[in-house]
Image: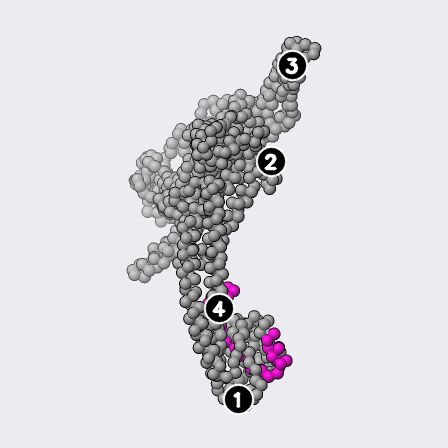
């Protein structure tokens, strides 16, 4: 928990990697995921680095793997359900000799696949063409074999109907054009033929019996056969140009029936031969694809690791002797022994006689931030990181967000029934968290926050029990503390009172009417009261103010661990907050405790007291809460006002004094050093060492510091007021959720409960389904999202800005697992 409260200690290390073992050392570090490498060649172009050739080799291999994946998804039968499965166990990074083997085998496999796929596609195209030719001869044989064919043309646009009667045997020099056309192109094809040829042709269209594959798209199409009869070369040229324009497939059409029969028999034989060869080609192609499926996942992972290693080596700088590579990396201090072990293991695998080693370096830049996370804390940490990543060793708000975020959400969403539904949905995601179907990239927002949703549901059940609401209905877990018997016994209520009043008021001052507070939550009798809304508004408003002030005060207290400025920052801020708003909470709680139901009519107004506190006056009509209240309030206001100048001037003045003292001390130290150096100087003393002490910390902009502190003071003082009012959203959204839930019950569910008998059962079933859909869509999804966003705002603006800067950056360690997972998600 210590490293979760503050980020882990991270140090800058300098790695000396021997040239022969650098590859294996980086591979071991990638398996462990310990360090984040820094670029030591920022001014060197990516194409001019030492290992750019190896990176390009890996990229070429990845292109080959992409081609293999495309062939697998296109041609494998039966097709894979989803992407290729990852290899188990995960293979290690390949050695240079192994990479050459992968390169040769993958290229040979890709080459064979290309050749076989090309042959398969060629055979399919030939088969389709032969089947089309066969269909043309078969479908048009009945037309040319008859003595007389009548063709009626109708062209709607010109309203002309022309009748043709033609005897194929009587007319000589009749020419034919036959082929197939896509069925979508038939109307425009026929219209253009009519307009271009002026009726000097005879056209017949018929659909083929079988569906054939389209050579370009691969879809199955029921082609349309056409036969065009014409006379004259000019008409024939026009017809052929139109056919080429529509990209029709035309075939040679013999004039005699005997020739057509002979061609049909030849086509049938060729089709059978091509089908036989095509089946063998498909079988061989499937063997190649199955072999690719077996080896491709391992190849991809190994090449990804090799590429990642080479890119890390490009970040390194060669030594002067070029016998080793020098790298710099951020590493958690607790993981330094593992770092040394990884370097030794890399040297052992390489057979190097000299081990690689590391040195710790001082750093002028702040280290990156690293928090140990698991599946439970990740969702809460993401909420904080969306505001800003914590600076190095800054207090992490995610530790407290685990409790405060679900609780503030539940205050606005309090309902036992709705919280139970949310809990069950989150519990299902928690129990099925290992299901790969749920843990997909598109479900990351919901699935990643499953523990957050679970806690929000559980807290909503708790606050719903306090509000005594379950789908807007009250729960009578205990007996009510209000009794109507004493009102009748003392003749306050009688028959005439009941007849003359629609609403009756129960007087808690009367003995026996109110016997004491309800054991847990709100008394269910308030559900029947006509002033229920007034009572709940008062209760929830005070509750929101109390929760908000406690939340903000806790945030101010946490600033001690971040800024370590106790006297001039934390104490004045706490005095200002507690003296004004903490006292307001005290008055609310004191009034609840000190005044019973019998004294409720004489209880003073807290609001008037709070106003009089700032005006330094007393209201005779508003009695004091306790003796000496006026003196206490005056002291608190004075303390709050005195804390403002301390907060405004204290910190920059203190820093200015410390700077002056340090500057004077450095001046005297420099004078003492000059006395020890003769006029000609000493070879053991540099001029920078004499003058550097005086120049150390020379820059201090006092005006800038005072201005910055003034802005902070104004923002804090005004923010205490506005942020306290902002917490009233807890009351507003809680009221809105309760009212929407009640409206949905009254306007929908109550209608179904009025019906009786079998008809009532059917009506209840239908209306309950409608009620359930509205409950989930409006009250759970929309209202839940609204409460989530408001709770998010309360944490980011009202809570975190009291102590959290969020100006850091994450430690992004070099890890093979993260690289492979990222590529799999893409």
Residue found at x 47% / y 35%: 24
- Judging by the rendered image, the residue that carries numbered circle 3 is 683
Q: Magenta region: which residues?
A: 215-241
- Judging by the rendered image, the residue that carries numbered circle 2 is 42
Residue found at x 47% / y 29%: 353
Q: Earlier in the sequence, mark 4 or mark 2?
A: 2
C-alpha distance separating marks 2 and 1: 87 Å
Tag of residue 626: none
Could you say whether the residue bearing mark 3 is in a helix, strand or loop? loop
Q: Is residue 643 above or below residue 502?
A: above
C-alpha distance separating marks 1 and 3: 122 Å
Q: Earlier in the sequence, mark 3 or mark 4?
A: 4
Q: Quick one: label 1, few (<14), some, or many (20+) residues within 10 Å?
A: few
Q: Is residue 545 above or below residue 242?
A: above
The nearer-to-camera label among 3 and 4 is: 4
Residue 161: x and y in percent read 57, 84
The one nearer the camera, 36 or 647, is 36
- Judging by the rendered image, the residue that carries numbered circle 4 is 126
């Amino acid at each position: 928990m210590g490293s979760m409260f503050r980020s882990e200690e991270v140090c800058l290390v300098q790695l000396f990697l021997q040239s022969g073992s650098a590859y294996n050392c980086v591979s071991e570090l990638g398996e462990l995921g310990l360090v984040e490498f820094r670029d030591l060649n920022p001014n060197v172009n990516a194409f001019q680095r030492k290992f750019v050739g190896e990176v390009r080799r890996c990229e070429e291999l990845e292109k080959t793997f992409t081609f293999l994946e495309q062939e697998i998804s296109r041609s494998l039968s039966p097709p894979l359900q989803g992407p290729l499965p990852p290899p188990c166990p995960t293979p290690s990074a390949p050695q240079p000799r192994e990479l050459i083997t992968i390169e040769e085998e993958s290229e040979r496999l890709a080459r064979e696949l290309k050749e076989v796929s090309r042959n398969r596609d060629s055979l399919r195209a030939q088969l389709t063409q032969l089947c089309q030719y066969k269909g043309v001869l078969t479908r048009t044989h009945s037309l040319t074999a008859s003595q007389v064919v009548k063709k009626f043309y109708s062209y709607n646009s010109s309203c002309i109907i022309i009748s043709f009667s033609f005897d194929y045997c009587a007319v000589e020099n009749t020419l034919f054009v036959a082929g197939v056309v896509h069925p979508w192109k038939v109307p425009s094809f026929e219209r253009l033929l009519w307009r271009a040829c002026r009726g000097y042709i005879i056209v017949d269209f018929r659909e083929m019996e079988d569906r054939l594959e389209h050579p370009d798209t691969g879809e199955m199409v029921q082609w349309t056969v056409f036969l065009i009869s014409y006379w004259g070369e000019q008409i024939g040229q026009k017809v052929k140009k139109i056919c080429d324009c529509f990209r029709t497939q035309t075939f040679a059409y013999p004039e005699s029936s005997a020739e057509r029969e002979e061609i049909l028999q030849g086509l049938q034989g060729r089709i059978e031969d091509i089908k036989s060869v095509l089946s063998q080609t498909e079988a061989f192609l499937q063997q190649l694809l199955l072999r690719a499926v077996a080896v491709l996942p391992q190849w991809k992972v190994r090449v990804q690791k090799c590429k990642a290693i080479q890119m890390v080596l490009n970040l390194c700088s060669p030594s002067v002797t070029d016998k080793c590579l020098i790298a710099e990396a951020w590493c958690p201090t607790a993981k330094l022994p593992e770092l040394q072990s990884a370097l030794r293991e890399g040297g052992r695998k390489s057979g190097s006689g000299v081990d690689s080693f590391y040195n710790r370096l001082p750093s002028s830049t702040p280290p990156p931030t690293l928090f140990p996370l698991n599946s439970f804390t990740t969702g809460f940490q993401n909420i904080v990181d969306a505001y800003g990543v914590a600076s190095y060793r800054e207090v992490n708000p995610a530790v407290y967000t685990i409790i405060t975020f679900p609780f503030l959400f539940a205050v606005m969403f309090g309902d036992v029934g709705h919280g139970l539904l949310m809990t069950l949905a989150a519990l299902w995601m928690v129990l099925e968290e290992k299901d790969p179907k749920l843990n997909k990239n598109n479900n990351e927002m919901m699935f990643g926050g499953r523990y957050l949703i679970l806690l929000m549901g559980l807290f909503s059940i708790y606050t719903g029990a306090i509000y005594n609401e379950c789908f807007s209905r009250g729960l009578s877990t205990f007996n009510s503390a209000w009794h109507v018997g004493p009102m009748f016994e003392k003749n306050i209520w009688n028959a005439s009172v009941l007849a003359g009043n629609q609403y009756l008021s129960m007087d808690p001052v009367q003995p026996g009417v109110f016997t004491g507070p309800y054991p847990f939550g709100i008394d269910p009798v308030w559900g029947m009261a006509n002033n229920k809304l007034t009572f709940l508004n008062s209760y929830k408003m005070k509750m929101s103010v109390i929760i908000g002030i406690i939340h903000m005060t806790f945030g101010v207290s946490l600033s001690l661990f971040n800024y370590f400025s106790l006297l001039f920052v934390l104490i004045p801020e706490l005095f200002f907050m507690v003296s004004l708003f903490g006292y307001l909470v005290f008055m609310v709680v004191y009034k609840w405790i000190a005044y019973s139901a019998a004294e409720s009519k004489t209880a003073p107004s807290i609001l008037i007291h709070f106003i009089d506190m700032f005006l330094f006056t007393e209201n005779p009509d508003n009695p004091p809460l306790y003796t000496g209240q006026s003196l206490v309030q005056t002291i608190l206001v004075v303390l709050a006002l005195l804390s403002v100048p301390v907060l405004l001037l204290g910190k920059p003045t203190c820093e200015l004094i410390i700077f002056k003292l340090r500057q004077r001390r450095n001046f005297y130290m420099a004078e003492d050093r000059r006395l020890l150096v003769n006029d000609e100087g000493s070879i053991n003393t540099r001029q920078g060492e004499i003058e550097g002490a005086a120049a150390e910390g020379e820059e201090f902009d006092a005006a800038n510091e005072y201005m910055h502190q003034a802005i902070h003071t104004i923002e804090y003082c005004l923010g205490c007021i506005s942020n306290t009012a902002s917490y009233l959203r807890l009351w507003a959204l809680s009221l809105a959720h309760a009212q929407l839930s009640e409206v949905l019950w009254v306007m929908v569910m109550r209608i179904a409960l009025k019906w009786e008998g079998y008809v009532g059962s059917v009506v209840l079933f239908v209306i309950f389904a409608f009620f359930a859909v509205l409950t989930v869509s409006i009250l759970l999804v929309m209202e839940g999202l609204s409460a989530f966003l408001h709770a998010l705002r309360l944490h980011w603006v009202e809570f975190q800005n009291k102590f959290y800067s969020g100006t850091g950056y994450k430690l992004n360690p070099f890890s093979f697992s993260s690289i492979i997972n990222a590529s799999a998600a893409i």
